[in-house]
Image (tube, rainbow, N blue to C red):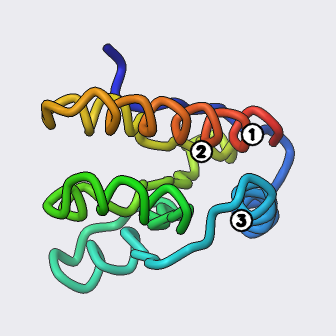
Amino acid sequence: MNYYNSTIIKGKNFKQVREEVEAALKEEGFGILTEIDFQATMKKKLDKEYLPHLILGACNPGYADKVVSLEPHVSTLLPCNVTLRELENGDVEVSAIDPSAAMSVVENEELVQYAEEVNNMLKKAINSL
């Protein structure tokens, strides 16, 4: 089982792709709860150079409520990470975790079903870019 879904965006800069990713996620009912600037963090902590690399914590509140109500400790697996990573050639790769893979460690079929629904929503958002 693959643990993520991704696509490569050509001909757009990092900022444009970020705006489009956030709009596509919003269209599917996701909000951004967290943001980690991986590039800046690695520069600050390790003095290591990276191309732009951003990790967004995306959450669909309705589904988060459903899964945490079923299994409170599942919140340790939330939110869904969506990454934007500039490649050497200037393209931008957008990737999102497959929540089905993450939730497969929890033995609860209803939870896995919700995770599959969320995965489909994340894939739809990424494929719309």
CA separation in Å, label 1 and label 2? 8 Å
Image coords of residue 73 (percent x, y): 14, 61
- 24 left or right of 50? right
Q: Which quarter of the rendering shows the N terminus? A: top left
- Judging from the image, what secondary structure is the residue with disc 1 in? strand
Label 1 packing within 10 angstroms: few (<14), some (14-19), many (20+): some
Task: Tell me which label, 1 or 2, sits earlier in the chain.
Answer: 1
Question: Which residue position is annotated with label 3?
Answer: 22
Q: Residue 103 got which mark?
A: none
Indicate which label's residue lies in the foreground, 3 or 2. Answer: 3
Q: CB under 8 Å between callouts 1 and 3? A: no
CA separation in Å, label 1 and label 3? 14 Å
Residue drawn at the location 53% of the way across and 68% of the way down: 61
Image coords of residue 105 (percent x, y): 14, 33
Q: Residue 9 got which mark?
A: 1
- Judging from the image, what secondary structure is the residue with disc 2 in? strand
Q: Which residue is at the front of the view, 51 or 92?
A: 92
Image coords of residue 30 (percent x, y): 63, 63
Instruction: Indicate the amino acid at tag 2.
Output: Val
Label 2 packing within 10 angstroms: few (<14), some (14-19), many (20+): many
Q: Residue 94 got which mark?
A: 2
- Labels in figure, total: 3
Residue drawn at the location 51% of the way across and 64% of the way down: 59
Residue drawn at the location 26% of the way across and 72% of the way down: 42
Instruction: Indicate the amino acid at tag 1.
Output: Ile
Residue drawn at the location 56% of the way across and 73% of the way down: 32
- Judging from the image, what secondary structure is the residue with disc 3 in? helix
Q: Which residue is at the front of the view, 105 or 10?
A: 105
